[in-house]
Every structure is written in structure tokens, then in C-alpha cells.
């Protein structure tokens, strides 16, 4: 598909969504308390920009997201590689990881407060819990996806197990691992509201929860849109980096 048509299709769908929103609110088919119009959301955006609220919230949330995801990735990457390449490490880690990954991150909020207090450490820990246990299994699957024939051929050339891991397995799996980074960063954004649920006084998730208590629907929608846009920008950045780093990959097969 031509690049121009690709972007036009995406923009058209978003435009249609906004048009439906305008019609519903302009004709008052939905009460403003439940769905304010785009103008109300825009005025709330201007107010938060003018008062510095939005920049402060965005900065705090970006800091927490970045640190939580980086800690998760720095641990998930070596563990996932070892699990994907060595049966011993898979047997060692996978039962525990499978157990924890089905536990909802929100259930850990009281415990994380007891363990780390109510500062940024608690919020980063929630983001870590919500991301790490899925990410490590995805990286393991990326490594396991390397064709067995490539490993066997490399072995016949006298490469050691660790040389095969570095020169063959990692290079083949790296595009998939990069996509895993992109996907799990998106998951981290979805856990932001959970991370800022309790004992926060700044952040996009905090602002959404505060607006809920006062029925400030336009502020809720604005916060959701800002999180969505930030997530979209990070996703696009990862995709652009993918195309530059892995030019040989034909993603359409």
C-alpha cells in the first residue's frame, strides 16, 4: 500500500470518530455530564496549559513510565534470552513468572505501599509488575523462534553455545525483541492510572482519578486523550527506529 494512502486511511478513521463525537454532543443526544463536546475538552486543555497543570502532570507520568519500563526491560532481556536458549533457566523461572503474570497489578497496590511507601518508587514498582512478567515471556518466545536449522549449521562450524547465542540467535531474534519492547511500552502506558491510583498528587492518572470524584468529565477525556497521544508517539518512534535498524526485514512477508 502506498504510504500516502496508508496515512489517509488512518486519518479518515480518526476524523470520522471525531465527527460522530461532534454530532452526538451538538445534538445533545448524550448529556454533557457523560460526554462533553470537543470544545469543552479543548477549553480544559487550554486552561491546564495556561496554569501549567498539564506540563507538570505529563512530566511526572513520563518519568514514571520511562523508569518503570526501563527497569522491567533491563531485567526481562537477559532473563528472557536465557529462558529461550537454555531449558534449565526456562524450568527455573517460568513456573513463577506464569503464576505472577495472572495476578492483577492493581491487587499489588496495598502491598507496594507497605513495601516502598507512597513516593515514585511505589508507582514505578506497579508499572514494573504490570510489564515485566509479560515482557520476559515474549522475549523468551522471540529467542525460541530462531530456526533450529540455523543453530545446527552454526554448531557444525565449531561455534560454542555462547557464540551461537550471540552471533546467531540474538541477531535473528533482535527484530522481534524490538517489537516486544514497543508492545510492552504500550502496556506500561495502560498501567499508568493504576500506578497513580493512590497517594499521588501529580500525574495524568492522578488527574483522571481526581476529575472522576468531581464529575469533571472533560478533564477525564483530556487525560485519556493525552495518554493515548503520548503512547502513539512512542509507538511511532519505535516503528521508525525499527525501519532504520532492520532494513532487511520485509514485514509484509
Image: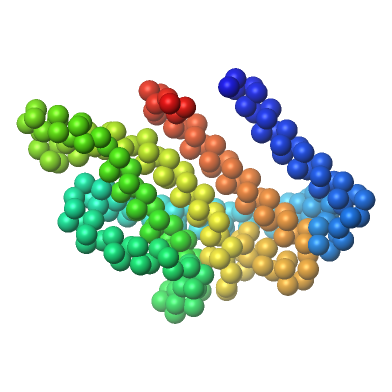
Name the spot of residue 235 as percent of width and height, x first: 53, 41
Q: Residue at x 78, y 68 (%)?
A: 215
249 is higher (above) or lower (below) than 47: above
Q: Does 80 sit left or right of 189 as displayed?
A: left
Q: Does 50 sit left or right of 127 as displayed?
A: right
Name the spot of residue 115 as percent of width and height, x first: 41, 76
Pick the front one: 145 or 229: 145
212 is higher (above) or lower (below) than 12: below
Q: Does 228 sit left or right of 155 as displayed?
A: right
Residue farthest toward the top in the current orientation of the protein: 2
Q: Does 79 sit left or right of 73 as displayed?
A: left
Name the spot of residue 166 as percent of width and height, x first: 21, 37
- How is the structure coloured here? rainbow
Name the spot of residue 134 as percent of width and height, x first: 40, 56
Residue farthest toward the right in the current orientation of the protein: 27
Q: Residue at x 79, y 52 (%)?
A: 41
Q: Quadrant of residue 193?
A: bottom right
Pick the front one: 217 or 139: 139
Amino acid at each position: 500500500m502506498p504510504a500516502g494512502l496508508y496515512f489517509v486511511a488512518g486519518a479518515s478513521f480518526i476524523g470520522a470518530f471525531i465527527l460522530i463525537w461532534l454530532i452526538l454532543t451538538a445534538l445533545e443526544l448524550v448529556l454533557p455530564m457523560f460526554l462533553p463536546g470537543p470544545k469543552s475538552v479543548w477549553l480544559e486543555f487550554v486552561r491546564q496549559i495556561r496554569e501549567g497543570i498539564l506540563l507538570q502532570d505529563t512530566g511526572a507520568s513520563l518519568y514514571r513510565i520511562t523508569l518503570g519500563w526501563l527497569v522491567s526491560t533491563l531485567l526481562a532481556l537477559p532473563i528472557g534470552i536465557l529462558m529461550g536458549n537454555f531449558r534449565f533457566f526456562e524450568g527455573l523461572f517460568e513456573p513463577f513468572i506464569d503464576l505472577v503474570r495472572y495476578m492483577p497489578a492493581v491487587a499489588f497496590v496495598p502491598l507496594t505501599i507497605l513495601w516502598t511507601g507512597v513516593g515514585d518508587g511505589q508507582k514505578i514498582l506497579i508499572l514494573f509488575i504490570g510489564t515485566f512478567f509479560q515482557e520476559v515471556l515474549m522475549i523468551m518466545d522471540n529467542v525460541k523462534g530462531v530456526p533450529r536449522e540455523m543453530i545446527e549449521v552454526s554448531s557444525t562450524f565449531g561455534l560454542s553455545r555462547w557464540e551461537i547465542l550471540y552471533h546467531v540467535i540474538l541477531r535473528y531474534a533482535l527484530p522481534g525483541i524490538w517489537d516486544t519492547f514497543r508492545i510492552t511500552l504500550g502496556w506500561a502506558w495502560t498501567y499508568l492510572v493504576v500506578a497513580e491510583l493512590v497517594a499521588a498528587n501529580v500525574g495524568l492518572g492522578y488527574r483522571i482519578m481526581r476529575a472522576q470524584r468531581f464529575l469533571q468529565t472533560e478533564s477525564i477525556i483530556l487525560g485519556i486523550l493525552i495518554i493515548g497521544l503520548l503512547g502513539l508517539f512512542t509507538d511511532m518512534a519505535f516503528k521508525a527506529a525499527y525501519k532504520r535498524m532492520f532494513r532487511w526485514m520485509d514485514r509484509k512477508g
